[in-house]
Image (spheres, helix red, strand yellow):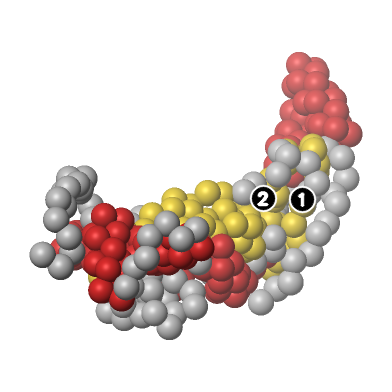
Amino acid sequence: MNPEKIINPPSGFATFIVSMVLLIVSVLLFIEGQLAIGIILLIVTFIFLLPGLIIVNPNESKVLTFFGKYVGTVKKDGFFWVNPFTVKKKVSLKAFNLNGQQLKVNDSIGNPIEIAAVIVWQIKDTAAAVFAVENYIQYVNIQSEAAVRHLANTFPYDNLEDETATITLRGGADQVSEMLEKELNERLNRAGIEVLEARISHLAYAPEIAHSMLQVQQASAIIAARKLIVEGAVGMVEMALNKLSEKNIVELDEERKAAMVSNLLVVLCGDKAVNPVVNTGTLYH
């Protein structure tokens, strides 16, 4: 593969002025009847001078080849003159956005998910982009899809089914994006392309299991909430018993303590409003 070679050709303004002068002179020669010299000047102008003029816009480049041989790349913006027989291919140096399509793949534990990524890339080596691959834009699209699929197969969607997972697609967004960017740079380096940023833009369970996984997530949330409520209720019951004992408000034997604990837990852990019941007798009748 040819390494990129940056060239700085001469300015094209002098060549352009010479071409205009030769055109004027050739017209005058035609008027005076000196056709041979006028034709020669026209050939020199239209075959050797004007075809060599190129304009390079900011953040663009021209890759030059001469009869199949790579000559170099013009990256400096401006108006230049190069060998008129070179083939000039424009290659943009601007940053490109690739909004990947939604892919349906399986995560590391086999759950079908939908995933898509947004990738920002830029050409760094114009020679590699033009000569190493057939079509560098198509190459980016295909390799990006392959990298996203590989990433989705490497990690679970979340840790509901795999509690030992340290990185998940949903919970480790920064780490996953960093890994995706690294893998893309390795894949696209052959084409002289650098990935500036890669982010997961869409992540969801596939429609056929989305409802079931939503129920699992809701159940996990309810269990976590109940666990927190029970821990808080036990602490409040313990505090209440300690306060009653410290201030000698009432003497409670073990049976009364058990009844109070039961009533307090029912009140604190219930998900509905509690209606108080007035006991007019005693605990033992």
Q: Secondary structure at mark 2?
A: loop
Q: Is residue 55 above or below residue 211?
A: above
Residue type, label 1 = Lys
Q: Residue at x 81, y 32 (%)?
A: 16
Front tag of 2 and 1 = 2
Q: Position of residue 19 (x, y in %)?
A: 81, 31
Q: Residue at x 46, y 60 (%)?
A: 248
Q: Position of residue 67 (x, y in %)?
A: 66, 64
Residue sitting nearer the eye, 82 or 200: 200
Mark 1: few/some/many CA within 10 Å (<14, 14-19, 20+): many
Relative placement, left or right, of 28 versus 85 is right
Quadrant of the image containing the N terminus: bottom right
Relative placement, left or right, of 155 versus 63 is left
Relative placement, left or right, of 187 versus 73 is left
Query: Does the image show residue 106?
Result: no
Quadrant of the image containing the C terminus: bottom left
The quadrant in which residue 45 appears is: top right
Q: Position of residue 128 (x, y in %)?
A: 64, 68
The quadrant in which residue 249 appears is: bottom left
Sequence-first tag of 2 and 1: 1
Q: Residue at x 70, y 49 (%)?
A: 61
Q: Secondary structure at mark 1?
A: loop
Which residue position is annotated with label 1?
75
Q: Residue at x 60, y 57 (%)?
A: 197
Q: Is residue 196 above or below residue 162?
A: above
Q: Residue furthest top?
A: 31
Q: Is residue 1 above or below residue 233?
A: below
Mark 2: few/some/many CA within 10 Å (<14, 14-19, 20+): some
Which residue position is annotated with label 2?
93
How far apart marks 2 and 1 lie (CA) works out to: 9 Å
